[in-house]
Amino acid sequence: MNPMKSNISPLQASRSAYEPKLPKALSGKVSKVALKTGKATRSISDQDAIKKLFESTYGQPEVSFVPGKASASMNKAVKVALVLSGGQAPGGHNVVAGLYDGLKKLNKKNTLTGYLGGPSGLVENKKMEITEKLLVGYRNTGGFDIIGSGRTKLETHEQFETVRKNLEAAGITALVVVGGDDSNTNAAVLAEFFKHHNSPIRVIGCPKTIDGDLKNEQIEVSFGFDTATKVYAELAGNVGRDCLSAKKYWHFIKVMGRSASHIGLEVALKVHPNICLISEEVAENKWTLEQIIDQVAQVVSERASKKMNYGIAIVPEGLLEFIPEMKKLISELNDHLAHSPEFEKLEAPEEKVAFAKHHLSEESRGAFHSLPHSIQVQLLADRDPHGNVQVSKIETEKLLIEAVDHKLKNWKKEGKFNGKFSGQGHFFGYEGRCADPSNFDADYCYSLGFTASYLVAAGLTGYLSSVRDLLKPASQWKAGGVPLTMMMNLERRHGKDKPVIQKALVDLKGKPFKAFANLRKSWAAEDDFTSPGPIQFWGPSNVADAVPETLRLERGR
């Protein structure tokens, strides 16, 4: 958090001079803006239940900022609070910069206070003022280190009341929450709480997650997705080049995306791997682990018959939870082991495995027995603070390598496989979360933050900052806000129905998946690897300013 950084690389020094672009309605020294209001909205489902839970904020209209006659300004200075919530995503610092610049443009006396370490900072009242001197070292950089982030969930009345008191005592009149679906669900609940209790504090959200599962008609893409997938695609492309050079390894690459496979699909469209598993397709077809292993082994075998004993397989990190028998197994492990004092006393892995087998149903016991011992131990050892399985820590890529190797050895004994198989496992995760943002993310994030400042100026609450028409040049983007309740539904969590922003899964009928499905057979059979290379900040627009492939396919004409 020191603005006088000494560890700036030559690239970062040059990158600091980049000036992010804005939608026309918000650009220029003086913005002449009109607020356009749409029709009343309703939640994506469970309308009666959501309306009852959000009586004060439900049904608000979508809004947009369009060129107008009056100059946008704020006669009375305000104090705005900011919190970064959840995992990091490239471009977060540009959201902060856009919010700060927008507030200062509206009134030079406006101030921005950052709460440290995520939502816990709101409760613990840990904060610092964000100034231009501080920001200068963070513009166009990756990470959330300007004020830090955290995963604390605000769930109790006591927490909400503490946050209200802390913000009101500091003179804060608006809170901007930068986060994913869970964080912005929190933002919606806070907005409702404040308004219900006649607090002047307004709440605005910004859509963040590299997983890409916070999107809909109004939110075309979450920020950070473009940069992260470009980083993973570069690495996967490098591996593809190694495949063509060494011609002796099968590389199984696990990529982030526990709840959806958008990252895996985007990387596949960029790199053209021989295999890419899509979790949503697995769930749709109710494929068993054995069926998945058969499919992968078949591709390996067919390539081996042509002396191609190498390849790339992309694996989403949440794959196991989409396999029906594995989903049931994980659920049973969570139910039986999360709060078991007897299990907690066990230390030896063998004792834990024996305990688990004894408490599982016959079907889940069979699924558990089919797993390699190392994966069994991971299922029982890596647990979150609530005692649940941490699926993201399970080495799914190694599980597949071991299972495919076992299958091919059996096929070799039966005379059905005559090739060689040597697997290499990789996990591309943290490498992409804090990369310096691409031009697209730098512009998009800055615009989201800037838009949030105008939503604050408009006196709105319970809205998510929205910037649309992203395939067009930034000057033609449309800025506005979407009511958070519009994106909500009820989900069963820990035995209770809770309102949450609906996650966007890969649409198996959508254009991106169809494009992938039409090409994967040829990718499996041939060497069609592409090498996207590193993110380009300068150069031809079709390279430096390229948008995500999935966005291009979804929104293109």
Image (tube, rainbow, N blue to C red):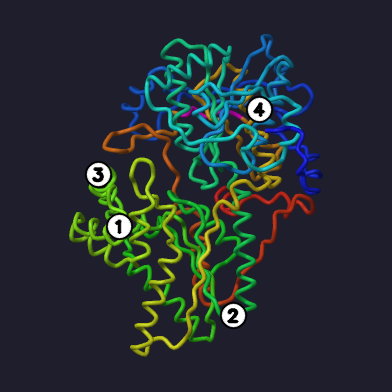
Tag 1, which secondary structure? helix
Residue where numbered disc 3 is placed: 341
Residue where numbered disc 4 is placed: 99
Q: How far apart are marks 3 and 4 (CA)?
A: 48 Å
Q: Please name whichever residue, 166 or 7, is drawn nearer the observer in this view of the structure.
A: 7
Residue at the (39%, 27%) spot, across then down: 155
Q: Which of marks 3 and 1 is in front?
A: 3
Which residue ends up furthest to the bottom in the rendered image?
A: 415
Q: Measured along the vertical axis of the image, is residue 508 above or below residue 149?
A: below
Q: Please name whichever residue, 47 or 341, is drawn nearer the observer in this view of the structure.
A: 341
Dot placed on the residue nearer the N-terminal end, 3 or 4: 4
Q: Nearer the viewer, mark 2 or mark 4?
A: 2
Tag 3, which secondary structure? helix
Q: How far apart are marks 3 and 1 (CA)?
A: 28 Å
Give percent across and percent down for residue 430: 56, 51
Q: Distance between the residues labelled 1 and 4?
A: 44 Å
Residue where numbered disc 2 is placed: 247
Q: Measured along the vertical axis of the image, is residue 251 above or below residue 48?
A: below
What span is colored magenta in the figure? 480-484
Dot placed on the residue nearer the N-terminal end, 3 or 1: 1
Q: In this view, does 261 lie to the left or right of 106?
A: left
Q: Which of marks 3 and 4 is in front?
A: 3
Dot placed on the residue nearer the N-terminal end, 1 or 4: 4
Give percent across and percent down for residue 149: 55, 35
Q: Quadrant of the image for the N terminus?
A: top right
Q: How crowded is the residue under tag 1: few (<14 C-alpha within 10 Å), some, or many (20+)?
A: some
Residue where numbered disc 1 is placed: 324
